[in-house]
Image (cartoon, grey):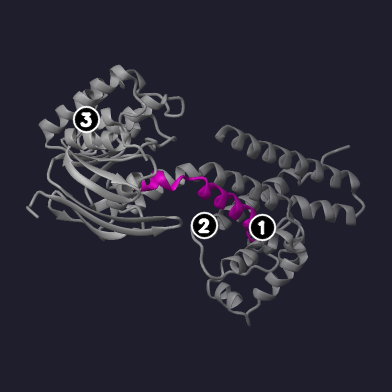
């Protein structure tokens, strides 16, 4: 059995999409993770529910919402258009879909990380005259890092496996938007089971490495 | 109130516990002495500005600090649990907010921390942790320290040595402190004046020897 010639290209593209998607999710996940770990406020449960929804919704439903929201008649789509960002049938669309789908996992990791930081240490740093920004950088963030990384690695793995939302937003355009998961589907469609198995094997290997790394990270942080 | 005097007047209602305290003292080194659960640590945290559920007036060293953020109260804190930064070495903990890093060697030697400087804090004993917390507060350059049972985890020989070093630092660097303790020996060593506290209320403020005698007499009284 010979390996499909585009296996490396598709693998690298998938890693690129997953990496960018995770990075895109990381900023808001850190902000909301810190908020949920530290504050009780009206509407907290509703907001959490909304933000965690992509984890349990059918990915194609999320893709459909993203596709509709990216249209020029919707504020999000108009904003993207004003930036010159076309997401439909593009790699940017794949990144956007990946970011939305991995966001809940990154958020939960960050929240877990921030919740594990003893507020007493931040209080102590404050009594030593340390500014809030420096406390955040020198105490809070380093102590929350194991949780943040755990969520980010799981989010990255989720991005790599993303199919439903990606296929609706970015499609399966050979040489442009094809990722490992969509390549598996496309190969099955054209009855090329050997190629499908090769793409799937790489996906499984990458997922196993990532989950193992995340668990090892958590084990070492304990 | 003179320009160097100290005073706090604090109020709070917690579930099952009411705090109504008002105390003034003049000594540079004073103690808040009372049994466990009498509200001592709560008062310390209120003085530091760490408790939103306690309000009132706080004047330390003649300066009103109520309403000022902990960063700007100029109070050093040595909590009972040491609260060391676990992601940093002993050296990094000591230097976390050091005003004068050149004093590290002197402080580390006096507190017998020299061989521990490069170690992580996770494996330290209770006594070692407490000495690191003391060193960190001394290096921070804060002139008014709030000490929560600062010698409690030290063994007997080291207690005397560390207490003497603290007093030497106090003399040389014009340090003041308010110490919280339920240990008469610790209070006797480190405080000139003592505030007696019981069940969230101040009983008396007097010279330490007299305060300890009174506390002992009260403890020996039959119910």
Residue A4 showing in the rendered view: no
Q: Is residue A66 above or below residue A216?
A: below
Q: Is residue B110 above or below residue A60?
A: above
Q: Give the spatial CA distance, label 2 vs label 3.
A: 53 Å
Q: Chain of mark 2?
A: A
Q: Give the spatial CA distance, label 1 vs label 3.
A: 65 Å
Disc assigned to residue A27: 2
Question: Residue A116 lies in magenta, yes or no?
Answer: yes
The reply to whether label 2 and label 3 mark residues of one chain is no
Q: Nearer the viewer, residue B9 or B107?
A: B9
Q: Chain of mark 1?
A: A
What kind of element bears circle 1? helix
Q: Which of disc 2 and disc 1 is earlier in sequence?
A: 2
Across and down, in percent, residue B150 comes to 30, 32
Instruction: Say which residue label 1 marks.
Output: A98
Q: Residue furthest left?
A: B2
Residue in view at x 89 percent, y 37 percent: A1
Q: Residue furthest front?
A: B222
Instruction: Say which residue label 3 marks.
Output: B188
The reply to whether label 1 and label 3 mark residues of one chain is no
């Amino acid at each position: 059995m010979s390996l499909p010639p585009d296996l490396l290209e598709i693998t690298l593209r998938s890693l690129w999409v997953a990496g960018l998607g995770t990075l895109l999710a990381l900023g808001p996940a850190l902000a909301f993770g810190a908020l949920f770990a530290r504050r009780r406020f009206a509407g907290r449960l509703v907001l959490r529910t909304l933000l965690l929804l992509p984890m349990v919704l059918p990915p194609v439903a999320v893709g459909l919402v993203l596709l509709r929201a990216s249209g020029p008649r919707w504020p999000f789509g108009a904003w993207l258009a004003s930036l010159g960002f076309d997401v439909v049938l593009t790699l940017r669309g794949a990144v956007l879909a990946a970011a939305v789908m991995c966001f809940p996992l990154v958020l939960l990791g960050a929240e877990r990380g921030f919740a594990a930081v003893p507020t007493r240490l931040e209080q102590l740093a404050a009594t030593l005259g340390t500014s809030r920004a420096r406390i955040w950088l020198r105490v809070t963030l380093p102590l929350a890092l194991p949780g943040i990384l755990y969520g980010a690695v799981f989010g990255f793995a989720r991005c790599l496996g993303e199919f439903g939302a990606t296929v609706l937003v970015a499609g399966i355009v050979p040489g442009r938007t094809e990722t490992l998961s969509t390549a598996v589907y496309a190969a099955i469609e054209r009855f090329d089971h050997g190629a499908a198995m090769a793409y799937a094997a790489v996906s499984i290997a990458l997922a196993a490495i990532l989950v193992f790394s995340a668990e090892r990270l958590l084990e070492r942080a304990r | 109130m003179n320009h160097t005097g100290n005073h706090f007047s604090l109020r709070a209602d917690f579930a099952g516990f009411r705090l109504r305290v008002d105390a003034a003292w003049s000594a540079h080194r004073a103690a808040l002495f009372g049994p466990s659960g009498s509200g001592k640590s709560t008062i310390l945290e209120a003085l530091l500005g760490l408790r939103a559920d306690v309000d009132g007036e706080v004047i330390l060293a003649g300066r009103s600090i109520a309403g000022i953020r902990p960063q700007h109260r100029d109070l050093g804190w040595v909590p009972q649990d040491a609260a060391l930064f676990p992601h940093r070495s002993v050296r990094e903990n000591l230097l976390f907010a050091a005003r004068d890093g050149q004093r590290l060697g002197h402080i580390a030697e006096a507190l017998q921390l020299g061989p521990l400087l490069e170690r992580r804090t996770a494996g330290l004993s209770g006594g070692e942790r407490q000495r690191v917390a003391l060193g960190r507060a001394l290096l921070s350059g804060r002139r008014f320290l709030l000490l929560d049972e600062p010698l409690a985890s030290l063994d007997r020989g080291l207690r005397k040595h560390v207490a003497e070093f603290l007093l030497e630092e106090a003399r040389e660097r014009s340090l003041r402190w308010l110490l919280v303790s339920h240990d008469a020996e610790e209070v006797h060593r480190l405080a000139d004046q003592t505030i007696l506290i019981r069940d969230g209320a101040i009983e008396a403020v007097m010279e330490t020897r007299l305060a300890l005698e009174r506390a002992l007499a009260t403890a020996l009284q039959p119910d």
